[in-house]
Image (spheres, rainbow, N blue to C red):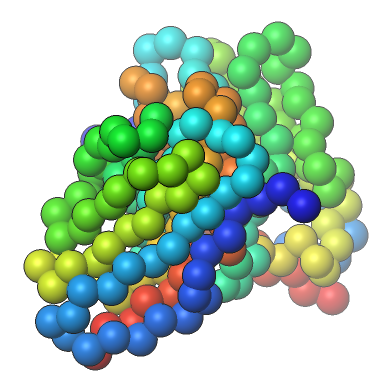
Amino acid sequence: DGGITQSPKYLFRKEGQNVTLSCEQNLNHDAMYWYRQDPGQGLRLIYYSQIVNDFQKGDIAEGYSVSREKKESFPLTVTSAQKNPTAFYLCASSTAGKEQYFGPGTRLTVT
Amino acid sequence: AQSVTQPDIHITVSEGASLELRCNYSYGATPYLFWYVQSPGQGLQLLLKYFSGDTLVQGIKGFEAEFKRSQSSFNLRKPSVHWSDAAEYFCAVVIWGKLQFGAGTQVVVTP
């Protein structure tokens, strides 16, 4: 079964702690993306990667970091510098220039 | 400036009635256009896409959309809504190489 997996589905952290969200795809897509979703704001791009070992900042990269060591994996770290980290995080992948396919999402709650 | 506009935040429709969701974009050239659907707490599922050619595109779940260049619009339609169509719908447009999302339209289906 081809697709995108994100884990965990729910994540709870205390303020001041870094947390890493997992995203894995077996679609053989070159490009991968991280989005943040807040109610009433649609999706906002955090980071994207078009090839292994390379990634670019999106519209709201401050307080986040990523790595792309393998084609299949694109983990997102939410650092303590992110002022308002509680949100729903979505990972996506695509073949270059084509439609993006999304994972099921991770809901992060920071208290 | 908002590049992708979904004018309706919330639409209520009776089961069996027709549905039309509006999407307008700001871009000089003809973009790639998409509609996605999201059930609560889930990822986004691609309903349909437009890259070029026939301006009326068919998608999954009985949905269709029409690209109108003169109106910079890509409205989504379904002739007869089912209770399972209750969800949030996002229009997305590739502008300057980046996928931009509208804020979404919440669809409620009443018996």
Q: Which residue is at the front of the view, B34 or A46?
A: A46
Q: Relative to A92, say whether B81 is above or below.
A: below
Tell me where residue B41 appears, x and y as whole percent: 56, 72
Tell me where residue B31 appears, x and y as whole percent: 49, 19
Q: Residue furthest left?
A: A81
Quadrant housing residue B54: top right
Q: Which residue is at the front of the view, B81 or A23?
A: A23
Judge whether residue A74 can be spotted in this image.
yes
Q: Which residue is at the front of the view, A77 or B102?
A: A77
Tell me where residue B95 appears, x and y as whole percent: 39, 24
Horizontal side, residue A60 vs residue B83: left or right: left
Q: What residue is shown at x 39% (from left), y 30% (from top)?
A: A51
Tell me where residue A19 appears, x and y as whole percent: 28, 73
Q: Relative to A38, say whether A12 is above or below.
A: below
Q: Relative to A10, say whether B73 is above or below.
A: above
Q: Residue furthest front?
A: A69
Q: What residue is shown at x 52% (from left), y 64% (from top)?
A: A6
Q: Quadrant of the C terminus of chain A?
A: bottom left
How many discs mark residues in the rendered view? 0
Horizontal side, residue A87 vs residue A62: left or right: right
Q: What residue is shown at x 38% (from left), y 34% (from top)?
A: A52
Q: What residue is shown at x 50% (from left), y 13% (from top)?
A: B30
Q: Which residue is at the front of the view, A84 or B6?
A: A84
Judge whether residue A40 can be spotted in this image.
no
Horizontal side, residue B31 vs residue B1: left or right: right
Q: Relative to B92, say whether A86 is above or below.
A: below
Horizontal side, residue B81 vs residue B47: left or right: right
